[in-house]
């Protein structure tokens, strides 16, 4: 049961955080409030009156707005066109863009959400796009704003700015609910926090005076280690060499520009950067999913530039992909069948795949990586996000690669699953493997990486020692500050 007799009270003029593990029921509860889902039982009261919200349009009419984690914007439209879409001002039965621009300008000034109404969405930063999403909801009269993972792709400076915006909205009489897994930001932003575990409300607490450890314990039901415990690195031979790499994106525009770096056995190298600064294209080149336009990629001294994913895997590269459902798993395959993906020759005998061998490896993954439920015959789509990720991480690690490339390995996972995966990445480093970590989570990069490379506009603009890095320093570099880029 996604939600089991949850009682939730939201006070006017507060910032209320919803915390919980993956699958705890947070998003389901908010989707009910926004009209995307219909509850089986229970009642919703809005301003003291019982209401039945049967769709988003009714929620919007009541004054409830929602900003989803993945923005719902049209890239080729301007800021103003996106904000008014579906509620366009008209003059003489024609679209009145002059009025629209003026309304957007006045609204953005009123709430401190400065944007240029004439900028195209594809040309503005992620932080500015989020402002546009918030303005869309305010333009439609939202009094209650639901923000789903609002800081997931923001730099520390943008998070700080978002906090100021939220405080300003509350001062204007608005109410905000945030769904997030970032405990530090909950304590910094929220007035109260509700913890949900396995569909049930565990507690509603004042955020003041609480600790990250206390909230993590309530979320998971046990003590959780939030700080990664690791010894100093002992880097040895170079495993990965990237030399003057260039690559285009899907639109044929330069996405990776003259990138050079190496990763040694026995170290974790982290790549930090705001989403969309060439990280995805770089990793696609390293894993054979995209051909670079110039430069070289060497694994263990062997040139693998432009080779197929199979050849690169055979050269000793393991890959935990950014999107576990699209690139990491076949959702309609069982755990056992997914255990063989990308390594079919190891399971073949006389031209036939050995299902028994798949089962053996799947059982090993399940046992060593604590996959729940412990069933090799379960379809991958039936597993939670955290357990899907454990299957992928387990499969790649058990292949014993020389280089493990982990891209967003804990995206959308709860603190318990994050702790487990972090521990395994460090264990790979300590076993003498080279690990390349790409993450939008600065805490993750700073906790795990021995060296940190910062990407901005397709270039590596700085390298920082992991133990010396600070959030402010990395955040500034991620925005192009002090780089000359």
Image (cartoon, rainbow, N blue to C red):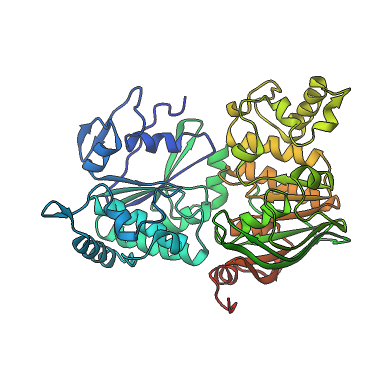
Position of residue 41 in the picture relative to residue 124 (left or right): left
Where is residue 380? Give x, y as percent.
Answer: 63, 28
Position of residue 456 in the picture relative to residue 363 (left or right): left
In this rendering, the answer to whether 147 lies above or below 109 is above
Q: Nearer the viewer, residue 348 or 421?
A: 348
In this rendering, the answer to whether 77 lies above or below 419 is below
Residue 279 visible in the displayed image? yes
Where is residue 435? Give x, y as percent.
Answer: 76, 54
Where is residue 356? Give x, y as percent.
Answer: 81, 20
User: Would you identify the image quadrant in which residue 26 lies?
Assistant: top left
Residue at the spot 68% in from the left edge and 66% down from the top edge: 453
Residue at the spot 72% in from the left edge and 50% down from the top edge: 287
Position of residue 232 in the picture relative to residue 473 (left or right): right
Q: How many marks?
A: 0
Q: Nearer the viewer, residue 172 or 385?
A: 385
Q: Nearer the viewer, residue 306 or 390?
A: 306
Residue 174 visible in the displayed image? no
Residue at the spot 69% in from the left edge and 22% down from the top edge: 375
Where is residue 423? Give x, y as percent.
Answer: 73, 47
User: Would you identify the image quadrant in which residue 330 lies?
Assistant: top right
Q: Quadrant of the C terminus?
A: bottom right
Position of residue 144 in the picture relative to residue 244 (left or right): left
Query: Most extreme residue toward the left, as rendered?
Result: 92
Q: Nearer the viewer, residue 234 or 153?
A: 153
């Amino acid at each position: 049961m996604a939600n089991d007799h949850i009682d939730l009270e939201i006070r006017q003029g507060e910032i209320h955080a919803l915390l919980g593990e993956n699958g705890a029921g947070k998003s389901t509860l908010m989707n009910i409030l926004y009209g995307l889902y219909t509850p089986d039982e229970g009642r919703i009261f809005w301003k003291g009156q019982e209401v039945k919200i049967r769709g988003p349009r009714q929620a919007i009419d009541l004054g409830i707005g929602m900003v989803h984690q993945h923005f719902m914007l049209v890239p080729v439209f301007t800021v103003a066109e996106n904000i008014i879409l579906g509620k366009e001002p008209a003059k003489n039965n024609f679209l009145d863009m002059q009025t629209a621009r003026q309304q957007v300008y006045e609204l953005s000034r009123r709430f401190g959400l400065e944007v240029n109404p004439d900028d195209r969405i594809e040309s503005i930063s992620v932080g500015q796009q989020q402002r546009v999403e918030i303005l869309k909801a305010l333009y439609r009269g939202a009094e209650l704003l639901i923000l789903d993972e609002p800081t997931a792709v923001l730099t520390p400076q943008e998070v700080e700015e978002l906090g100021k915006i939220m405080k300003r909205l509350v001062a204007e009489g608005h109410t905000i609910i945030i769904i997030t897994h970032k405990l530090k930001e909950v304590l910094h932003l929220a007035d109260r926090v509700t913890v949900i575990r396995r569909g049930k409300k565990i507690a509603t607490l004042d955020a003041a005076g609480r600790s990250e450890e206390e909230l993590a314990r309530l979320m998971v039901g046990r003590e959780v280690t939030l700080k990664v415990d690791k010894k100093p690195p002992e880097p040895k031979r170079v495993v990965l060499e990237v030399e003057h790499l260039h690559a285009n994106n899907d639109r044929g525009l330069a996405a990776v520009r003259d990138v050079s770096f190496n990763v040694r056995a026995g170290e974790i190298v982290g790549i930090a950067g705001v989403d969309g600064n060439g990280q995805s294209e770089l990793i696609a080149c390293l894993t054979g999913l995209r051909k670079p336009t110039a430069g070289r990629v060497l694994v263990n001294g062997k040139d693998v530039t432009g080779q197929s994913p199979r050849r690169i895997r055979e050269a000793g590269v393991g890959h935990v992909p950014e999107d576990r459902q699209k690139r990491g798993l076949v959702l309609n395959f069982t755990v056992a069948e997914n255990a063989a993906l990308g390594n079919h020759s190891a399971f073949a005998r006389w031209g036939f795949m050995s299902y028994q061998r798949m089962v053996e490896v799947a059982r090993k993954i399940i046992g060593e990586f604590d996959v729940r439920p412990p069933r090799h015959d379960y379809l991958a789509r039936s597993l939670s996000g955290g357990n899907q990720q454990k299957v992928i991480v387990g499969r790649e690690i058990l292949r014993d690669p020389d280089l493990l490339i982990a891209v967003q390995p804990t995206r959308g996972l709860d603190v318990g699953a994050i702790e487990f995966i972090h521990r395994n990445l460090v264990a790979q480093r300590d076993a003498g493997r080279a690990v390349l970590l790409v993450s939008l989570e600065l805490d993750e990069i700073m906790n795990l990486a021995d060296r940190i490379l910062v990407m901005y506009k397709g270039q590596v603009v700085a390298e920082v020692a992991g133990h010396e890095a600070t959030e402010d320093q990395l955040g500034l570099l991620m925005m192009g500050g002090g780089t000359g880029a």
